[in-house]
Image: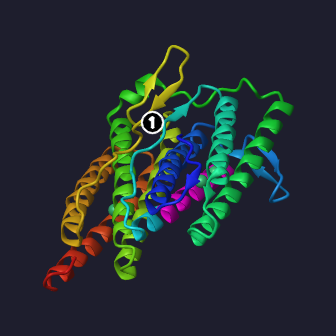
Amino acid sequence: MEEIKTIKTQEDVIKLLNTALEHEWAVSFEYTIHAYSMPKGKFFYEDPIMKSRTDARAQTIQIGIDEMYHSLQLGIIITQMGGTPSFKTDEVVRYPKIMDNLKRDKITEDMVINLYQSAEFEEGAFPKIQNMIWNISYDEVRHSQQFEAMMEAIKMEGNEEVLCFQPIAENREREENQLLHEITRLENKLLHQYLKYVLLFSEHQDLSQRLFKNSIDHMRHWDKNSGLLIKMKDVIQIENAVKDENGVERSKSPMPSAYPGEDRLPALENLIPAEKALIAKYEKLISLVKEKEIKEQLELHLALNQEHLFTDEWLLKNAQKIKGIK
Ligand SMILES: [Fe+2]
Ligand SMILES: [Fe+2]
Ligand SMILES: [Fe+2]
């Protein structure tokens, strides 16, 4: 993460916000992936902010969602300032041990706190941006304290060596598992593709809010599918990750860095085939899966994707009715 100290011009602001954005995209994944690599309801800690005994896994997912909202805030401001939000990301890493992932989470929080809090603005320049950055930085301060408390509890209970879920090789080769990985990858792509258009059309609240709703649905599906993979004795994959000899997985491209469509019509035209392809894959997977609970969850995802398709088709047709709309 590049440090950007002195902020004078609009370009400096956009550079700072895009540097932060590439971090926020990465951690929104990284934390959720770390969470879905550990068991539910097993590692509790005393949360220093909420003052309650909390499941480390559940809270790590919540923090990942906070990071997604940071991305959204940054992307909207970058767009309003005439910049282009970056969809590149910082590196995403998963260690074999739960404790090592939490250590990394705490370190990345402290790094980004430093990025936000060390930016020096010229007196009176961009006051609202300065305020936003301070506000985000204190979410990060909270996250850092929460990760710290999770680590302390794990240490106290002697769980430092506990490993993340390991996929069972034969299961991963099954058609159902491969299809679910593929679907989960597409959910992830669509979630960000919708978000790109949410940012692009943020001044048109009617359009951006409809697209945002779909994006959030895809985020939930990604999340739920990660849980289903565990039930299928598997574990969420990190896209384009390379595993080293110590079992550490690293990826610099955990999501596509570019999505097609810069105007309303091409954007909507791109969403329709993507939703159709996803629907077809869910239908295929549902026909293969035998376990009732998994099948029912997949059917819920399929139903919402059918709703998205209806919405997108009408958003496109309605836009086509208005000559010259962008
Ligand atoms: Fe953040
Ligand atoms: Fe954070
Ligand atoms: Fe969808």
- What is the quadrant of residue 136 in the picture? bottom right
In the rendered structure, the answer to whether residue 261 lies left or right of residue 156 reads left
Residue at 36% across / 59% down in the picture?
84
Residue closest to the eye, 241 or 40: 241
Determine if the magenta segment contains residue 20.
no
Q: Is mark 1 within 8 Å of ligand 2?
A: no
For the question of whether residue 44 can be seen, the reply is yes
x, y percentage for residue 148? Answer: 77, 42
- Residue 91 in picture, x, y percent from top left: 49, 36
**In the displayed structure, does residue 13 sit left or right of residue 177?**
right
Instruction: Please state which amino acid type lies under the numbered disc 1.
Output: Ile
Question: What colour scheme has been applied to the protein in the rendered image?
Answer: rainbow
In the displayed structure, 177 sits above or below 242; it is below
Task: Kindly indicate the quadrant of the structure image that contains residue 301.
Answer: bottom left
Split into quadrants, the picture shows ligand 1 in the one at: bottom right
Question: Can residue 39 be seen at all in this image of the molecule?
Answer: no
Over which residues does the magenta segment extend? 57-74
Front residue of 312/93: it is 93
Q: Name the residue carrying label 1.
A: 238
The x and y percentages for residue 278 are 28, 54
Most distant residue in the top direction: 245
**Can you say which quadrant of the picture contains the C terminus?**
bottom left
Judge the density around disc 1: few (<14), some (14-19), many (≥20) Cα neighbours within 10 Å.
Answer: many
Find out whether residue 61 is within the magenta segment: yes
Say which quarter of the image contains residue 174. top left
- Front-most of residues 118 and 314: 118
Magenta-highlighted stretch: main secondary structure? helix
Image spot of residue 158 (x, y percent): 82, 27
Left or right: 180 as drawn, with respect to 5: left
Name the residue located 26 percent from the left edge and 73 percent from the top edge.
310
Secondary element at tag 1 = loop
